[in-house]
């Protein structure tokens, strides 16, 4: 597929927040109702389908979604356990610390790689995990422990990274009338609670919308509707980065508009919102001067090894960059890259980043693996074209 974007202008609606929708579907299921959203992305369909199979004995196919697997490992124990399976890429993502703490509290696990059979009776108590592997472990336990018979305490034993996602889980629990109390380095969690069903739609997705907002900064003007300014999604951090690099940002209660300006280099701590980093790598190429992306350790454990994938993407367009240690990428941007063939892994965030490079490339980007965007943003290419981007079959 040839991708080019010379002049971008228009308005698109944010897709529903994937992070919030995972949590909403799980809590509604625990409250007694199975929901099956229409026109959902692949990750949400995986969660919804697995939730519909809880308690039936059918295997839970988590597809390629780390959140589905990590959330349902403990949640499935509320329904007698399950066999969980998924893609080869999902099998490579870390889950051992979560399995270990579940087994310490009564779970029975037959192996540490997919497919996994979990069973036994999960007990309340004190749960402790390192905080630097995956915030999803803590969200998974927050979505489970309130519904056990006794009270529990959940601790992180090292500083918690991507804490905003755990805060989002806490907020979603509150919406469903489930109470947890924040303490130093963790939560006190009363047991024996009951969730209520919530019908309100979830907010727009800042993570997916970050690609379109960044497109506006690089190539014209883009308005994205449906983004809440009081959102607890960590990916709202994109606004701070866009303002830092000199883009014109106008945010209201109902929409965000980003317009092109003279872009300059920026710095970003990738541990705050790791999913933003591929998009920010493209922004760094479109900016003048040095952009520093650091604290990128956890990018190696996403749908692909995104640290290596970003470096390969930058190599493909002859970007001037360097790596420092194993967790930092420094991009020396000049506002333009060359086009040409770009092979990205089957990773939705990398495909979106490559599309953004089409807005600052001297010749079209020839992109493979374009269907990967269905994982989080099924209408990405339709919206890209509506804003003025060009997408042609090779």
Image: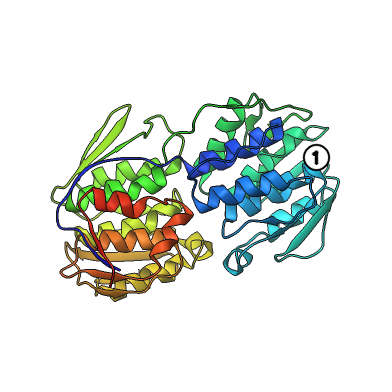
State whether residue 263 is above or below residue 310: above
- Along the horizontal axis of the image, is 382 left or right of 152? left
Identified at 76% across, 36% down, the residue is 152
Instruction: Work out whether residue 122 can be spotted.
Output: yes
Residue 290, given in percent of the width and then of the height, sits at 23, 61
Identified at 71% across, 66% down, the residue is 113
Instruction: Work out whether residue 157 can be spotted.
Output: no
Residue at the disc numbered 1: 125
Name which quarter of the figure residue 281 lies in: bottom left
State whether residue 143 is above or below residue 273: above
- Along the horizontal axis of the image, is 77 left or right of 252? right
- Along the horizontal axis of the image, is 104 left or right of 178? right
**31 vs 322, nearest the viewer:** 31
**372 vs 338, nearest the viewer:** 372
Look at the image and tell me in which quarter the C terminus lies. bottom left
Q: How is the image coloured?
A: rainbow
Name which quarter of the figure residue 294 lies in: bottom left
- Along the horizontal axis of the image, is 70 left or right of 211? right
**217 vs 383, nearest the viewer:** 383
**235 vs 355, nearest the viewer:** 355
Look at the image and tell me in which quarter the N terminus lies. bottom left
Residue 7, given in percent of the width and then of the height, sits at 14, 53
């Amino acid at each position: 597929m040839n991708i080019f974007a010379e002049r971008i202008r228009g308005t698109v609606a944010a897709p529903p927040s994937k992070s919030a929708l995972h949590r909403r579907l799980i809590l509604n299921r625990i409250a007694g109702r199975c929901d099956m959203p229409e026109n959902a992305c692949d990750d949400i369909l995986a969660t919804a389908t697995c939730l519909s199979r809880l308690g039936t004995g059918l295997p839970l196919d988590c597809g390629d979604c780390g959140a589905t697997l990590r959330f349902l490992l403990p949640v499935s124990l509320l329904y007698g356990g399950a066999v969980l399976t998924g893609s080869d890429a999902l099998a490579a993502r870390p889950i051992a610390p979560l399995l270990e703490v579940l087994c310490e509290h009564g779970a029975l696990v037959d192996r540490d790689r997919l497919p996994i059979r979990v069973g036994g009776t999960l007990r309340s108590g004190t749960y402790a995990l390192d905080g630097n592997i995956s915030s999803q472990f803590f969200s998974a336990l927050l979505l489970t422990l309130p519904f056990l018979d006794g009270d529990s305490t959940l601790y992180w034993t090292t500083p918690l990274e991507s804490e905003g996602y755990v805060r989002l889980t806490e907020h979603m629990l509150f919406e469903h009338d489930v109470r947890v109390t924040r303490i130093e380095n963790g939560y006190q969690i009363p047991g024996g609670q009951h969730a209520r069903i919530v019908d309100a739609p979830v907010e727009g997705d800042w993570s997916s919308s970050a690609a379109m907002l960044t497109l506006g900064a690089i190539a014209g003007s883009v308005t994205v509707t449906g983004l809440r300014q009081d959102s607890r999604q960590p990916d709202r951090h994109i606004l701070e980065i866009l303002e830092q690099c000199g883009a014109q940002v106008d945010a209201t209660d109902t929409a965000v508009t980003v317009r092109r300006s003279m872009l300059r280099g920026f710095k970003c701590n990738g541990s705050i919102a790791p999913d933003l980093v591929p998009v920010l790598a493209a922004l760094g190429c479109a900016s003048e001067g040095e952009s520093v992306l650091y604290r990128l350790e956890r990018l190696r454990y996403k749908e692909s090894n995104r640290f290596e994938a970003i470096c390969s993407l930058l190599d493909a367009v002859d970007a001037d960059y360097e790596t420092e240690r194993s967790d930092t990428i420094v991009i020396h941007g000049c506002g333009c890259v060359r086009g040409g063939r770009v092979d990205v892994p089957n990773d939705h965030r990398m495909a979106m980043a490559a599309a953004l490079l089409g807005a600052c490339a001297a010749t079209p980007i020839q992109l493979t693996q374009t269907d990967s965007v269905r994982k989080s943003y099924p209408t990405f290419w339709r919206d890209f074209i509506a804003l003025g981007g060009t997408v042609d079959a090779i």
